[in-house]
Image (tube, rainbow, N blue to C red):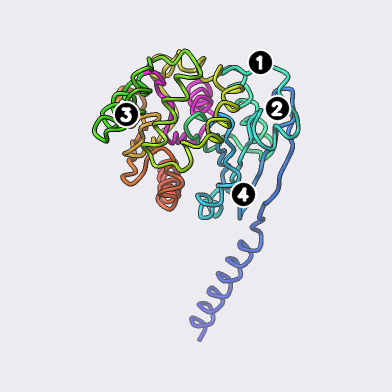
Amino acid sequence: MKKVLIILMFITFSVEAKSSIENHKIKIDTTEIVQIGGIKQFIDIKGNNKENPILLILHGGPGRSLLQFSNIFTDKLRNEFTIVNWDQRETSKTLDLNSSPNLLTVSLFQQDAVEMVKYLLKKFNRKKIFLISHSWGSVMGFYLAKNYPELISAYIPISPVVDCDESSLLSLIELKKWAKNEKMDVAIEELNTINVPFKTETYFFLFQKWLFVHNGVDGVLNEDFKKNYYKWMETWFPIWKENAKSNLFQTAPEIKCPIYFFVGKYDNQTHFKITKKYFKALNAENKKFICFKESGHTIFNTESDKVQEEIIKIKSILKLNIQ
């Protein structure tokens, strides 16, 4: 009888303990305006347990916020992380707050990212952060991983910018073959005028236009698309050209924090082949290349469930290694 009573008490205690833990989970769903880099910058913070690790997302573009798409690829992650979406300067809600008083440079964005990571670590009283970047976001992500590895639990570059010029050259060759096979006279004519590196907005636009047409993006041949793209280039083409002068083979030959590449098999923007080549050359004790076989550049749209599953798996692996 005593043995049965002890077992019942243990079960009751276990249930109560579990219930107590569940009750102490504090959800977080808020936005903040943070002073970063001398200006107001906008962040969105969501998670089902405030005590979970921080996961900062560095969006691409440049100038393309991920806030409106975030729910697609973070709904499961919110059970495992406190998700922070940040609109970088001159982007979306941060731009609504204020324009950048400084000339946009790669270094300026990298220093903003350092400040943001340090702010979040202090706010949540943590020593490290999980970091995700998409495309252009890797310009900041690799800078952080290379120079501040002690602050990064793991870095996950999605479709990273490794070498702009080499990627563009490969894609241009492929586009010319495609246009010829499809007998697209206008595409053939315009693509044949382009040289890499892109020194003018016209060359850059023509390349991007036919790349998007090839990839099945709707509305690219409309006049509105051209108008909007030239508007985007007024702000961002100079910094794109600045970044194109460097490549990760030279600037980040070694990474000392865990790094996991997420790359779409059909990515012809930052280019799968270039990223794979860099991964093989990269000196890193803990690195992995994860191929998304149904995706191009925006794998968080095409394979959002797998993206989340792989990130959760990374968290579990690192936890086991620490223990």
Q: CA distance from mark 3 to mark 2?
A: 49 Å
Q: Is residue 109 visible?
A: no
Mark 1 vs mark 4, foreground winner is 1
Q: Residues within 10 Å of mark 3 (few under 14, many from 20)?
A: few
Disc 1 secondary structure class:
loop
Q: Are marks 1 and 4 in contact (CB under 8 Å)?
A: no
Residue 53 drawn in magenta: no
State which region is magenta. Answer: 138-165
Which three-letter amino acid code belongs to the residue tagged 3? Asp
Residue 155 drawn in magenta: yes
Which three-letter amino acid code belongs to the residue tagged 4? Glu
Q: Point out which mark residue 103 bears.
A: 1
Q: Point out which mark residue 51 bears.
A: 4
- In percent of width and height, residue 298 lies at 44, 41
Q: Earlier in the sequence, mark 2 or mark 1?
A: 2
Q: CA distance from mark 1 to mark 3?
A: 40 Å
Q: Residues within 10 Å of mark 2 (few under 14, many from 20)?
A: some
On the image, numbered disc 3 is attached to which residue? 185
Mark 1 vs mark 3, foreground winner is 3
